[in-house]
Image: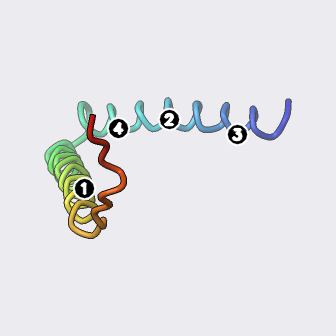
Amino acid sequence: MDRRKAGGVMIFILCIGGFFIYAYLLMLSEWSPIVMQLSMLMIVGALLAVIAWIGYSMATTRHSPASITDT
């Protein structure tokens, strides 16, 4: 197996394992409330970071009149 394929298999296995650990922490442990709070915080933070990045890109990109074609 080449290195790229082995890396892909490793990522796949780690993601499946991570899901089971997350499911255990969320459903069967006493850490459930903090896990849910941190999950929501990360989701909202990631979404707002993407929106902020889009806004920053829009604000700092120069307008090029040559890119607009009149037909």
Q: Position of residue 30 (x, y in %)?
A: 20, 44
Q: Amino acid at mark 3?
A: Gly
Would you name the residue on which mark 3 appears? Answer: 7
**What number is the disc on residue 54?**
1
Q: Amino acid at mark 2?
A: Cys
Distance from disc 1 to disc 3, alpha carbons, whole Å, reads 31 Å
**Do callouts 2 and 4 mark residues in contact (Cβ within 8 Å)?**
no
Q: Secondary structure at mark 1?
A: helix
Crowd class of label 2 (few under 14; some 14 to 19; many from 20; radius 10 Å): few
Would you name the residue on which mark 4 appears? Answer: 22
Distance from disc 1 to disc 4, alpha carbons, whole Å, reads 30 Å
**Residue at x 85% of width, y 29% of height:** 1
Distance from disc 4 to disc 3, alpha carbons, whole Å, reads 22 Å
Q: Nearer the viewer, residue 57 or 50?
A: 57
Labels in figure, total = 4
Q: Position of residue 49 (x, y in %)?
A: 24, 58
- Compare marks 3 and 2 and give the one earlier in the sequence: 3
**What number is the disc on residue 15?**
2
Q: Amino acid at mark 1?
A: Ile
Q: Position of residue 48 (x, y in %)?
A: 18, 55
In the figure, is residue 22 to the left or right of 41?
right
Crowd class of label 1 (few under 14; some 14 to 19; many from 20; radius 10 Å): few
Distance from disc 1 to disc 2, alpha carbons, whole Å, reads 28 Å
Q: Amino acid at mark 4?
A: Tyr
Distance from disc 2 to disc 4, alpha carbons, whole Å, reads 10 Å
In the figure, is residue 61 to the left or right of 55?
right
